[in-house]
């Protein structure tokens, strides 16, 4: 593993058309300062800066299956903390460290806030980003790789995040030449047992896999075909027992000998009657895959949320999906651009959007854009240094009320901030050229804020794309203390 190094700047110009999280594992230890937030019935609640934080990155997704040839990808992980201006009026003081851990390798510590660092990720092993003390508040990290070869072509950008116990991955398909890999990583000190369940077009898919054991601080990679067979529209549920796991799905596709694309996607928002996909980057249409966890049929509708408010999806945007099954809602008639999609149903559902960027029969790429949860605090991403020039399209949506949102980015080593006023059920597009980091937070208003980032490199038919949500970053934790009632 190479030592961490500072990220260098690059530039790229791109024009995009706008028509329109995962929670970090944070551990709090007694701080040096706290701010009271409530005092009633003999208890006091205080907000304290987090004293440690840990993020889990999947590691190179296309390696580590016994009997299956590894596909090497140049995965890199970047991490950093939000600048102090983003955390204001809170003040971070003291010392701290940020380190990368991949397998048994640990990087040299980083001790300066507001800068970014990147490191290679070890094959067939997860990478963890660990921060303590003054380096813990506002931590973010991202894993990314770009490949253009005969057997694989694509860009995969994955936020590093905390684990969960009940996760949904909505991606993949049954077409010839398509291969999906499920990557399960366990950042904990004890092994975890995982149950896997697949829903498909005709209901629950029988699976011979059973349970899977993920070792402590290790990972397991599985071929999804072994779980779902040739199901053309799978939705995979991951349930952990005895702990929590991080789960991502890698989807690669060959049309004969021509690579169609590659993407790694993260879990969707939990089942809900209302879902929002904040970064749907379309070239020539796409489809929304919907899964219904329970037995009752779902009546599902979709609409597009743009800068001027919501508009219906062309063609109606309504579908019925049987209980414990999946369905595909086609998106047609939308011009190339970046959209926010809202999906509603009469029963809880999960959803993710698929869109191909392939032109004709040449090599191409595609995206999976999952629904995300609204932000309770700060959202952020830090990006690896790469020789390729990349543009990041940040799409921010406010729903249920208005919101003023600040966007702070680092480009060429320089921080800048812009503020955007969003009325209820609108979205805003911010285009950044090779940013090293981006942070989004609601500064006022009552609207729910979500944000996703589309990453693009290359030109015209050779363009590579990926979509990832901005991940919530820990800053403070609420701690309650009891005291005598007078």
Image (cartoon, rainbow, N blue to C red):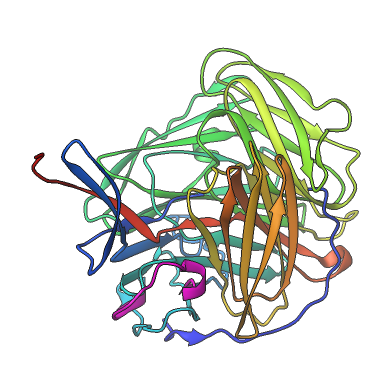
Q: Give the image quarter of residue 331.
A: top right
Q: Residue at x 75, y 21 (%)?
A: 319
Q: Is residue 102 above or below residue 253?
A: below
Seen in the picture, residue 281 relative to 165 is either above or below; the reply is: below
- Depth check: give the residue in front, 430 or 229: 430
Q: Give coordinates of residue 76: x percent, y percent.
A: 53, 73
Expressed as whole percent of the image width and height from the top left, the position of residue 330 reads 80, 33
Segment tinted magenta in the rendering:
79-100
Residue 149 sits in quarter: bottom right
Find out whether residue 331 is within the magenta segment.
Answer: no
The number of discs equals 0
Nearer-the-camera pick, 477 or 20? 477
Q: Is residue 188 visible?
A: yes
Q: Is residue 312 left or right of residue 133?
A: right
Position in image of residue 234 (x %, y %): 60, 34
Q: Quick check: 473 left or right of 144?
A: left
Q: Is residue 413 above or below residue 279?
A: below
Q: Residue at x 91, y 54 (%)?
A: 360
Q: Is residue 140 left or right of residue 136?
A: right
Q: Position of residue 94 (x, y in %)?
A: 29, 80
Can residue 253 be seen? no
Q: Is residue 60 rendered to the left or right of residue 405? A: left
Q: Quadrant of the N terminus?
A: bottom left
**Furthest residue in direction front, as rendered:** 486
Looking at the rendering, in which quadrant would you find the C terminus?
top left
Q: Residue furthest top?
A: 296
């Amino acid at each position: 593993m190479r030592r961490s190094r500072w990220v260098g700047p690059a530039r790229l110009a791109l024009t995009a058309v706008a028509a329109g999280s995962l929670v970090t594992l944070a551990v709090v230890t007694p701080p040096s300062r706290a701010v009271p937030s409530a005092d009633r019935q003999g208890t006091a609640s205080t907000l304290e800066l987090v004293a440690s934080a840990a993020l889990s990155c999947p590691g190179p997704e296309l390696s580590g299956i016994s009997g299956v040839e590894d596909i090497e990808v140049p995965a890199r992980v970047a991490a950093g903390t939000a600048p102090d201006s983003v955390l204001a009026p809170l003040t971070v003081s003291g010392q701290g460290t940020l380190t990368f851990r991949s397998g048994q390798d640990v990087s040299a510590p980083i001790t300066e806030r507001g800068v970014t660092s990147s490191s290679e990720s070890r094959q067939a092993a997860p990478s963890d980003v660990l921060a303590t003390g003054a380096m813990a508040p506002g931590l973010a990290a991202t894993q990314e790789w770009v490949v253009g070869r005969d057997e694989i072509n694509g860009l995969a950008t994955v936020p590093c995040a905390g684990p969960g116990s009940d996760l949904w991955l909505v991606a993949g398909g049954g077409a010839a030449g398509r291969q999906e890999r499920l990557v399960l990583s366990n950042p904990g000190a004890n092994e975890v047992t995982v149950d896997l369940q697949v829903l498909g077009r005709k209901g629950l898919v029988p699976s011979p896999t059973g349970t899977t054991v993920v070792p402590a601080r290790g990972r397991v990679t599985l071929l999804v075909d072994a779980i779902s067979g040739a199901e053309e529209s799978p939705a995979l549920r991951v349930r952990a027992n005895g702990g929590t796991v991080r789960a991502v799905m890698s989807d690669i596709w060959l049309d004969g000998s021509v690579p169609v694309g590659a993407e790694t996607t993260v879990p969707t928002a939990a089942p809900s009657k209302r879902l929002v996909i904040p970064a749907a980057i379309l070239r020539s249409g796409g489809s929304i895959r919907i899964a219904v966890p329970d037995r009752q049929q779902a009546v599902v509708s979709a609409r597009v949320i743009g800068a001027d408010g919501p508009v219906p999806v062309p063609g109606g945007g309504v579908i019925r999906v049987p209980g414990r099954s999946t369905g595909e809602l086609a998106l047609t008639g939308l011009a190339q651009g970046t959209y926010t999609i809202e999906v509603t149903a009469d029963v809880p559902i999960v959803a993710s959007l698929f869109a191909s960027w392939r032109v004709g029969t040449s090599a191409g790429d595609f995206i999976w854009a999952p629904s995300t949860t609204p932000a309770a605090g700060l959202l952020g991403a830090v990006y690896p240094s790469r020789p390729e020039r990349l543009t990041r399209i940040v799409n921010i949506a406010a729903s249920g009320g208005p919101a003023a949102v600040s966007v702070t980015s680092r480009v060429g080593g320089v921080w800048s901030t812009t503020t955007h006023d969003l009325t209820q059920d609108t979205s805003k597009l911010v285009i950044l050229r090779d940013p090293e980091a981006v942070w989004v937070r609601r500064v006022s208003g009552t609207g729910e804020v979500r944000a996703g980032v589309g990453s693009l490199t290359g030109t015209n038919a050779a363009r590579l794309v990926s979509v990832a949500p901005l991940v919530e970053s820990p800053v403070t934790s609420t701690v309650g203390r009891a005291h005598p009632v007078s």
